[in-house]
Amino acid sequence: MAVLTAGRSGSMSLYRACLHVRNYTAGHDSGEGALAAERSLLRAGHIEIDTRFAWMLGRLAEANGDKVYFVFLTRDAAQIAASYNRRWTNRKGIMRGYCETILQRDKPAKDIAIARDLVGTVEANIRTFLSGRPHSVIRLEHWREDLPRFFIDIGAEVDLEAALGSFAEVHNPSRRGSPLVRGRYWVSRRIDALEALLKRKR
């Protein structure tokens, strides 16, 4: 089973909740560092919550055929974008990768428009991929109704009270980076600007 999400939607909370399911194992980004072909291979009886699956949809389909049940974990798009917009200083974060590598733009101090574009793009990919495929939807704003329904959909043997309690806890919130992290990002932007200036003068 694969959980698809744009991120910043409670994926860690869902993982903690799924640890209370007795007839499934659960993982969160457990394929981190693996190539997409390997990361996309799913085990039977396992719930894998991976914030990068949205970029590997073709691989998921090829590797697992029609044997996979999907879950779309989502949240109000403006809230996801606002959360991402606080994470520009994360060197391995998807915001910088999307901005610099996919859109081929210089990294800004902050740019909510890029964060919104990221969220809109990823969620459109997920919605299109899921069309015609069996799946559940868990909306962060309606998790008290959607989470129990999801457990019913997959036939989970779950301690529901404990699972709901785990989901209610906040995990991995976006925080303002430390002065060192913010300073390193500021320097990297200045280096990028200098490189761009030198390239124009060649």
Image (spheres, rainbow, N blue to C red):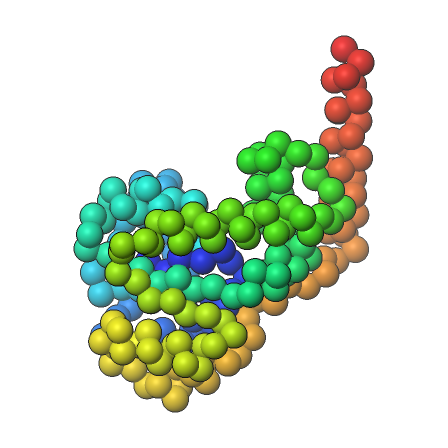
Side of 67 where 195 appears, left or right:
right
Residue 19 position (above or below residue 86): below
Q: Position of residue 134 (x, y in %)?
A: 26, 60
Asked whether 39 or 120 is in front, the reply is 120
Q: Residue at x 68, y 63 (%)?
A: 175
Which residue is painted at 56% across and 75% down in the image? 170
- Number of numbered callouts drawn: 0
Taking depth in this image into account, of 66 and 36 the one nearest to the observer is: 66
Answer with the quarter of the image where residue 143 lies.
bottom left
> Measured along the vertical axis of the image, is residue 129 above or below residue 21?
above
Which one is in front, 60 or 43?
60
**Depth order, front residue of 103/130:** 130
User: As drawn, is 199 to the left or to the right of 47?
Assistant: right
- Does 184 sit above or below residue 24? above
Where is residue 117? Give x, y as percent: 59, 47
Residue positioned most to the top: 202
Give x and y (percent) for residue 197.
Answer: 80, 22
User: Seen from this angle, which residue lies furthest bottom?
Assistant: 161
Quadrant containing the N terminus is bottom left
At x 72%, y 57%, the residue is 177
Q: Position of residue 200 (x, y in %)?
A: 77, 17
Q: Is residue 96 visible?
A: yes
